[in-house]
Image: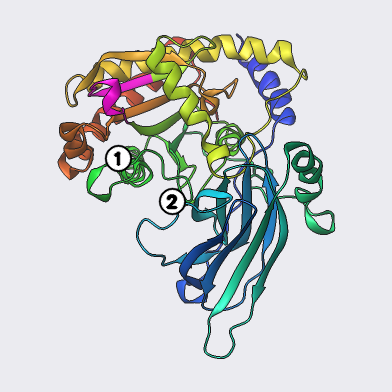
């Protein structure tokens, strides 16, 4: 594909999609309201949910279907709730979870046992020695009524739309290739859970920060991260983030888990995009990862429609080839530093790998359900060696592209 045609195609494709994360200034921690307790009361006909707060805050409540959920959006809150709160429900609520969804914004998601209507949602001022309180009242309804209500529940107030982390990008004069690192999960989305209090979102962020530093230290690349803190980023915005920066490579970092009843598994794997999964385990993992947005209380980001389908197909063919070459190189480098899964090179339909013009891989660093893998994943020495392996693979990838095509990534 000629460079001129590539440039024209990228420009046209860029007009089809949204782009980059806008910078934001985080508030000081003491500016956040503190949530100190949460509780449920009632039965399967009517249920009340209450959160104790240090001060009154704004609140927006809405419902989602498939599965049935109630979502509470609010300004950023410092959650200091009791351990394991939300794991068990009561009445209409099976369980609930909470966390940061963006800088300045927090969310609580309640999983419903059956369809329910939001009867009331409000926040009381502190009074008479009692803290401020967020109150949500739910009443059971049938599915048809739930689906009728959902259209009204989901409308943004005053015609507003949900704040997005993507904004138009600025022209970048630096000619070095852009590498985007994508630490999986974050904020309200914990990812897989391990023993000793470890969660996937923290493990992969720590590794991604080490990898970023090593890539930047080479001086060869511009490096950006879809998240550099404990923030939730929707899957579609992760892809848009990379495309907006015309990334030459997108590396999504994750850690897997396997239920005891499913046997044992160890080692790292590297995944590329495919409509048909390479095996049942790859299909299971892709399905689980693609539910990240639903887990966090929002619908999965919409896929592009019929616009520029022919151009997208042309771009995807070349992109898949580059993605596979990088995956093969990465597996080769990892063999020398990390334990690999018995089938380390796989493919599946991960949403986060679907940018049509950005070579992309998803790296599963290991299994948090394996004691030996978890010990490695939480080791500074292991992180350093494995990040070095990824850096060598990136060097090889862009070195090959320069030698073979004269195109040093996307710049």
Q: Tag 2: Cα neighbours inside 10 Å, few (<14), some, or many (≥20)?
A: few
Q: Provide the residue designation for mark 1.
A: 214
Q: Provide the residue designation for mark 2.
A: 88
Between 374 and 87, the one nearer to me in the picture: 87
- Mark 2 residue element: loop
Residue 351 on image: x %, y %: 55, 26
Q: In the rendered image, which quarter contains the C terminus? A: top right
What residue do we see at 76% from left, 50% from top?
A: 153
Q: Which residues are magenta?
A: 257-270
Magenta highlight on residue 295: no
Q: CA distance from mark 2 to mark 1?
A: 42 Å
In the displayed structure image, the side of residue 354 where residue 216 appears, left or right: left
What residue do we see at 57% from left, 31% from top?
A: 246
In the displayed structure image, the side of residue 315 where residue 345 appears, left or right: left
Spot the residue most to the right. Answer: 159
Magenta highlight on residue 261: yes
In the displayed structure image, the side of residue 195 where residue 94 appears, left or right: right
Q: Which is closer to the viewer, label 2 or label 1?
A: 2
Residue 209 lies, with reference to residue 263, above or below; the image says below
Between 18 and 14, the one nearer to me in the picture: 18
Tag 2 near tag 1, CB within 8 Å: no
Residue 396 on image: x %, y %: 33, 20
What residue do we see at 35% from left, 26% from top?
A: 394
Residue 337 lies, with reference to residue 210, above or below; the image says above
């Amino acid at each position: 594909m000629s460079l001129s045609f590539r440039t024209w195609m990228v420009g046209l494709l860029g007009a089809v999609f949204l782009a980059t994360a806008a910078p934001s200034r985080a508030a000081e921690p003491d500016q956040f309201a503190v949530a100190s307790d949460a509780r449920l009361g009632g039965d399967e006909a009517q249920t009340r949910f209450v959160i104790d707060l240090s001060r009154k805050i704004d609140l927006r409540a809405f419902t989602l279907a498939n599965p049935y959920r109630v979502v509470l959006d609010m300004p950023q809150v410092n959650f200091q709730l009791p351990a394991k709160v939300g794991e068990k429900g009561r009445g209409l609520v099976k369980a609930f979870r909470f966390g940061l969804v963006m800088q300045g914004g927090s969310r609580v998601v309640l999983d419903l046992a059956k369809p329910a209507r939001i009867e009331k949602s409000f926040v009381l001022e502190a009074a008479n020695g009692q803290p401020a309180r967020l109150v949500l009242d739910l009443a059971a309804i049938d599915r048809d009524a739930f689906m009728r209500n959902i259209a009204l529940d989901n409308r943004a107030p005053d015609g507003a739309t949900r704040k997005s982390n993507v904004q138009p990008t600025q022209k970048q004069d630096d000619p070095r290739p852009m590498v985007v690192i994508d630490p999986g999960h974050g904020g309200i989305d914990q990812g897989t859970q391990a023993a000793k209090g470890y969660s996937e979102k923290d493990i992969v962020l720590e590794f991604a920060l080490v990898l970023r530093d090593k890539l930047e230290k080479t001086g060869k690349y511009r490096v950006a991260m879809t998240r550099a803190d404990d923030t939730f980023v929707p899957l579609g915005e992760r892809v848009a983030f990379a495309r907006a920066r015309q990334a030459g490579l997108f590396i999504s970092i994750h850690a897997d888990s396997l239920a005891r009843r499913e046997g044992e598994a160890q080692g790292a794997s590297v995944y590329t995009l495919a409509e048909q999964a390479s095996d049942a385990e790859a299909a299971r993992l892709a399905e689980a990862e693609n539910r990240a947005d639903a887990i966090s209380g929002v619908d999965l980001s919409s896929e592009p429609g019929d616009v520029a389908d022919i151009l997208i197909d042309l771009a995807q063919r070349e992109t898949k080839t580059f993605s596979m070459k990088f995956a093969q190189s990465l597996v080769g480098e990892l063999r020398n530093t990390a334990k690999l899964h018995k089938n380390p090179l796989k493919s599946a339909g991960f949403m986060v790998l679907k940018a049509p013009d950005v070579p992309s891989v998803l790296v599963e660093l290991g299994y948090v359900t394996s004691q030996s893998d978890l010990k490695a994943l939480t080791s500074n020495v292991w992180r350093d060696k494995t990040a070095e392996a990824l850096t060598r693979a990136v060097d090889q990838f862009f070195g090959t592209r320069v030698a073979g095509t004269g195109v040093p990534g996307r710049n």
